[in-house]
Amino acid sequence: MPSLATVLRAKHVRGLLVFSQTGRLPMAAAPLALLLYAREVHGLTLAGLVVAAYTAGMAISAPLLARIVDRWRQPPVLWASALLSGAGFAAVAASGHRIPVMVAGAVVAGFGTPPLEACLRALWPALVPGEHVVAAYSLDLAVQEVIYVTGPLVTLAAVGLAGPAAGLLLMAVLQLAGVLGFALTPVVRTWRGEAGERHWAGPLRVPRFVVIVAGVICAGAAVGSLPVVVTGYAEAAGSRSLSGWLLAAQAAGALTGGLLYTRLAPGGPGRLPLAAAAFAVGYLPLLLVPGPGAMALLLAVSGLSLPPLLTAVFLTVDRLTPPGTAVEAFAWIITAFTVGSAAGAAVTGPLVAESIRYAFAFAPLAGAVAVVAMTAASLPLTRAARSRRGEEAPGVEV
């Protein structure tokens, strides 16, 4: 894989990937840590409220923190947000299970989540040659799947060794450790946002970017529905623990898809609808609701197209949004995916009670809406990008 090898050999890349993944691990591990802590005394409904408070705080703050990064620098924002988030986790751990303190601490922990993902995406053009940026995005998205496999395991290990509060404190430590290494890297310290016209709406003033955000919400809803449906499937099969293995199979598929995608030549905006269509179609075989072995295989297949889709989204967003809004634009995509994921989980819950097959149908339906939105957003990108940015328009490749 020449592109992948070039990306990994580039200066600072391996260190930044490790530090970024370390700091982002709580995104996958913190919801379970909060759930286990709250569940120790309170019911599952309240525990879910605490997790929702964390997710809401993270969704609200991501674009705000990213806008500050675009207009200032990365390290100060990363340091301040990591310290704020750590204080939130510590507050929950020291709450004595008092409901107002737990909810408030969860909001603060989520609100302070360091925007490491958006920051790293903005750095790739400065880290690798232009023709390898696609491979860099794909590698980043593929490696990210590792945290969704290891994150819950890290939480369970910490809770098993030292109790539920230890899981929360570990989240704060991991974030600070990741930010420490990331923010001290020379390329991060010297990075500056691109100069450009400032507007209160940031990248949201571009209508087609808003359409892409809507499409990402739908894609996130498809992905977020699966943990709920798979849990219901596993319980119907007589083993709740089976859900962990099935979701790990999907994450393994996404990791594989991301690594394979690094071997492809860079694609233009026309690749976004194709990637979205492959993403939606990948969920259709799940409607067969086969036995556990076949289901694990089908879930792995459904995960293959997620990194290519998100890679195409980030490349399109990079070309579509105005100069000086790169980090904020990426943060809006991340927030849209998070909000969609939460919405998908909420909508699918009642469907599971009715029928597992009906619940599995939600993902391809949400994916189909994402295809429509992303096709509409990408078709006129060539002319729009040229007129706004004064650049030679990229080819529309499929």
Image (cartoon, helix red, strand yellow):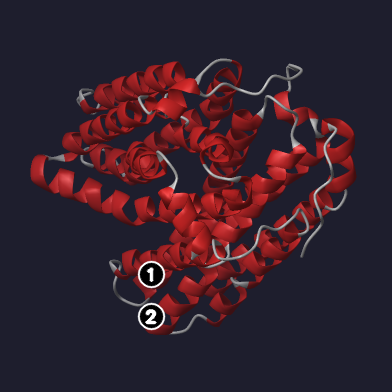
Task: Give 162 or 122, whichever is nearer the viewer.
Answer: 122
Are the residues at dot 1 and dot 2 in contact (C-beta closer than 8 Å)? yes
Q: Tell me: 99 left or right of 383.
A: left
Give the secondary structure at mark 2. helix
Task: Give 90 or 142, whichever is nearer the viewer.
Answer: 142
**On screen, 250 above or below 140?**
below
Q: Which residue position is annotated with label 1?
A: 246
Q: Tell me: 336 left or right of 179.
A: right
The residue drawn where x is 58% and y is 52% is 132
**Residue 254 screen position, x and y as percent:** 48, 63
**On screen, 90 above or below 360?**
above
Amino acid type of the residue that numbered disc 1 sits on in the rendered structure: Leu
The residue drawn where x is 57% and y is 35% is 122
Mark sitting on residue 292? 2
**On screen, 363 above or below 286?**
above
Nearest to N terminus: mark 1 or mark 2? 1
Res. 276 image quadrant? bottom right
- Crowding around mark 1 (Cα neighbors within 10 Å: few <14, some 14 to 19, many 20+) is many
Give the secondary structure at mark 1. helix
The residue drawn where x is 35% and y is 36% is 23
Q: Tell me: 4 left or right of 385.
A: left
